[in-house]
Amino acid sequence: MGRLHDWAKKQPGKLAVQMHETGKALSYQELDQRANRVAEWLLSLGLEEGSVIALLLENNIGTFELWWGARRAGMYYVPISILLTGREAAYIVRDCGASVLITSAATTDLARETLEALGADAPPHRLMLDGEGAGFENYDKAMSGFTGTASLPEKPVGREFMYSSGTTGFPKGIRRPLLPYARRYELPELEKKLRSMFQLDGNSVFLSVSPLYHATGRFNIRVLECGGTCVIMRKFDAASALEAIARHRITHGHWVPTMFSRLLALPAEVRDRHDVSSQRVALHATAPCPRHVKEAMISWWGPIINEYYGGSENVGVTYIDAKDWLSHKGSVGKPICGEMHIMADDGSDTELPAGEIGLIYFNGGVGFQYHNDSEKTKSVFNRRGWGTYGDMGSIDSDGFLFMSDRRTDLIISGGVNIYPQEAENALLTHPAVEDVAVIGIPHEDYGQEVKAVVQLKTGYQPSDNLANELVAFCRTHLSRIKCPRTVDFVDALPRSENGKLLKRVLRDSYAAKPVTATTAGG
């Protein structure tokens, strides 16, 4: 039946999953049996192989039995962010063609809004964990007729059906073929490398600090398939995360740069209170990490701060450990599988030499299709069959990748290409700057003008003088054309729950505004 079942036979009483805040836990034997129960229920509904169940859940321990139950029944599961509106969640439920919708008492309001937005398109089978709600059957009641001990048919291995974050428009489903039952132990070469890179084994104790509905939830699956233990935080909190590391003797964690910043912002007495020496690997990704933040984390936790760059599509992945990063600061590493190519962004199919910025392409990734969008799928691959996430970057003479920006974030001002991350990296070193986004706003003559949107650190107040100071500061690091001409101050920048800067939200807010006079920098 697969790796989880094998581990349940070898180590039935070992802790598989535990919620940090509440202590709720499942042993391998309990998780295995509860997953079987879910599979029995799904099969009893008469659903075909490849059917879809949608999961609208907070970080809930019940998620794990649903993941594996769907896998054993030969079905897809679609995790949906609970930060969406009901209308947005309904779009995903409808687009993926879900036959089942499972939610929880904690998300009752969102579940109701989603159901209202779905109308007649609502899935026929709807369950609620930990309670009841209008339009939803109680989960435990639905499962009560199933023991979890029945023999299951040999179905293809079900899997996740992820949706992109939608930072550049409507989210797109990323769907891959199911694996035949006879090949259930097979792993793609890229997946083997990921598990090796993360140094996973039966002694791994993984702290999951991100939402389980995010793509990083896959790391919990990897840990359990290697026989380790997952500790799940209900929601990230810096002080609580340190307490969890010390209490559970955490060996592995997956972080985002925003979390690092919040950890570093804790008072010294709080940071020093907790023993973090059990950690073997602290992996981070999903957003660029300011150099000074990463340097501070390496100084604190040691040379265990490793980084990767990739995406839900898995067209390619790069990796860099702390040692290599310290000698190539700012890099996201080298490919762990296949090769990397920097291509001209002019449709010429020209590969660029070291040091030049272009579109990042990979060969040797994992195949995929965007659900219901063959044209978008084609747009990911070039004529050579290499895939891209749409990001820009360059490779140094040693073969290490340095990110610039997403293609959609490129600013073209007066015919000159400007990569905003350069200015962002410079401004983040100013003592007043907590967070910054550099975007292009409409300009009557240049087409676009470079603007910085800045979140200040506590103790600093917005002013014209500070705006001018930031522009001048940037110009001491970069050429004038790359620096913002204007600076706006905000209380907080729009970021996803995993720290990804939502520049589209900022650009949209400025797109409707008339062009105004320059307020800083001239």
Image (cartoon, rainbow, N blue to C red):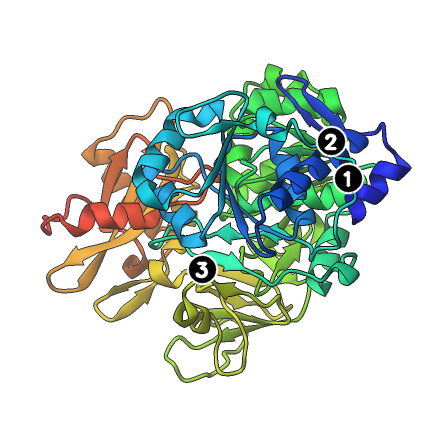
Q: Can residue 94 be seen in this view?
A: yes
Q: Which of 448 and 335 is in front in this view?
A: 335
Spatial CA span between label 1 and label 3: 53 Å
Give the x, y percent position of residue 335. Answer: 64, 64
Of the residues tagged 1 and 3, which is closer to the observer? Answer: 1
Determine whether 269 is above or below 352 in the image: above
Q: Name the residue under label 3.
A: 404
Q: Name the residue under label 2.
A: 147
Spatial CA span between label 2 and label 1: 7 Å
Give the x, y percent position of residue 277. Answer: 76, 28
Give the x, y percent position of residue 67. Answer: 63, 42
Query: Which circle's residue, 1 or 3, is located before the other in the chain?
Result: 1
Q: Are there few (<14), some (14-19), or many (20+) residues within 10 Å of tag 3?
A: many
Q: Nearer the viewer, residue 373 or 192?
A: 373
Q: Name the residue under label 1.
A: 150
Query: Which circle's residue, 2 or 3, is located before the other in the chain?
Result: 2
- Residue placed farthest to the right in the image? 10
Q: Are there few (<14), some (14-19), or many (20+) residues within 10 Å of tag 1?
A: few
Task: Give the secondary structure at mark 1.
Answer: loop
Q: In this view, does 357 lie to the left or right of 323?
A: left
Q: In this view, does 84 lie to the left or right of 521?
A: right
Q: Is residue 226 visible?
A: no
Q: Nearer the viewer, residue 81 or 314?
A: 81
Contact check, label 2 and label 1, Cβ < 8 Å: yes
Give the x, y percent position of residue 11. Answer: 88, 34
